[in-house]
Amino acid sequence: MPDSAVEKFEFADFTLVPSERLLLYRGDAVRLTAKAFDLLVALVRRQGRLATKDQLMGEVWPGIFVDEVNLSVNISALRKVLARSGDQLIQTVPKAGYRFIAPATVRSVLERESIGDQQDRVMPAGSSDNGDAYRAYLEGRYHWNRRSEQGLTRAIESFQRAVSLDPGLAPAYSGLADCYATLGYLSHLPPSQAFPAARGYAAMALERDAGLAEPHASLAYVKLYFDWDWAGAEEEFLRAVAHDPNWAAAHEWYSIYLLVVGRSAEALHEITTARQRDPMSLPINTDLGFHYYYTGQYEEALKQLKFVLAMNDGFAPAHLWLGRAYQELGQYGAALAAFRRVEELVPDWPVAIAARGCVEGIARHRAEAEATLLELERLATRKFVTPYGIALVQASLGRSEAALALLDKAFAERSHWLVWLRLDPRWNMLRSDARFAGLVRRMRFPG
């Protein structure tokens, strides 16, 4: 007879065998209603990831309209059963859905009917048998999602603690890759430090779990923003999506790539898909505003970014893009107010300071713009300051030669901001200059 595989999940003294419709607690069968059992399977299979209410209702009650209260009742029943573990295993994500947060191991039990023996094989699951390691990993993802320099520093500490407790925990290496990629993207570190470090950690993750989606997306991010390898970046993004179509960040980052290469309709589809996967994500909702900004839909960008800030007024990236949208609408006072709010939340962030200086120059607040240049110069003596930002302030003051020289320096440093040369509306003042057009050609954009 051919071998058949039986999927089995183990977590918090429970064993879940979906094909047998069996839940065990310390070896004893646990009673669940049919729908509660199906709901548990749907949650556990997404362990650590958001399961939206629509996704759960579509899987547990396929093709049938039921009131949302049925979902709430069954979640409550599950929590009562799982409470015997002593831990809260199901997290409610307000207005969005639920997340199964317990570390779980997935095993495939190979059954040979002719001889009746079994062989257990641990399958990649993105979790760990070590509860402390998995908790450290989840803590790292929480801090990474804050997208602040302090949050990223804490995330790195959490992920490093996770791999020290479980050196085989591939998602934690992927988390480190994402932290360094984000430090590079936000210009907290020079590109030459941040992106190669991200590449190295992504490779470590793939060595431990070649089927994990996250490191493929991390590699794609590096290929996009540091290597400027357009074909290679898309290949890795597609691999990430293929490995885990439900992982929202893969769709989010792929949308950014598609925007850069000029495929805005596809980009909108991907960022919308990302939001469907994780409706309340601050970064994803901010990147939808980012999409509207780079496609010239500034009023729509304002609406979207204000929506993000209504959820969390302390999310600095949303204020940054809000300010840039106001700038393109000629509302310079509102733009400056948005950038100052960013600086309150993230002191001494050169990206926000340069954005403010650019508006000051365009608004003909020349003395203020000159002071901002000095501020950036002083800041550069103690931390990385991207020349792309300084170039924007110089260009706003009408100093084309200085701006172009700084852009050449940014090119030599492989500044990731250069991927936006074709789309960043702040460069409209230089687009007629042949030297600027030459720089765009050097980026070898596709199409």
Image: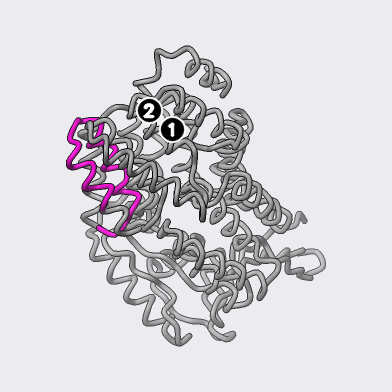
Q: Residue 318 carries which label?
A: none
Is residue 314 magenta-colored? Answer: yes
166 lies above or below 436: below
Look at 76% across and 68% down and name the residue there. 119
Query: Where's the N terminus, which quadrant?
Result: bottom right
Query: Mark 1 to mark 2: distance in Å?
Result: 6 Å
Q: Which amino acid does label 1 sit on?
A: Ala
- Asked whether, in this view, residue 370 is left or right of residue 7, the answer is left
Disc 1, disc 2: CB below 8 Å?
A: yes
Query: Where does residue 134 sit, x and y in percent of width and height?
Result: 56, 72
Is residue 348 magenta-colored? Answer: no
Look at 39% across and 45% down and name the residue there. 374
Span shown in magenta = 312-340
Q: Which amino acid does label 2 sit on?
A: Ala
Query: Where does residue 193 sit, x and y in percent of width and height?
Result: 62, 49
Q: Residue 395 carries which label?
A: 2
Q: Nearer the viewer, residue 94 or 409?
A: 409
Q: How is the image coloured?
A: one colour
Residue linked to disc 1: 391
- Asked whether, in this view, residue 253 is left or right of residue 337, the answer is right
Q: Main secondary structure of the magenta part?
A: helix
**Image quadrant of residue 50?**
bottom left
**Image quadrant of residue 346?**
bottom left
**Image quadrant of residue 268?**
top left
Query: Where does residue 73 sit, x and y in percent of width and height?
Result: 28, 71
Query: Where does residue 404 sit, x and y in percent of width and height?
Result: 48, 25
- Asked whether, in this view, residue 257 is left or right of residue 74, the answer is right
Query: Is residue 54 visible from the viewing direction of this image?
Result: no
Q: Nearer the viewer, residue 358 or 165?
A: 358
Look at 34% across and 21% down and name the residue there. 429
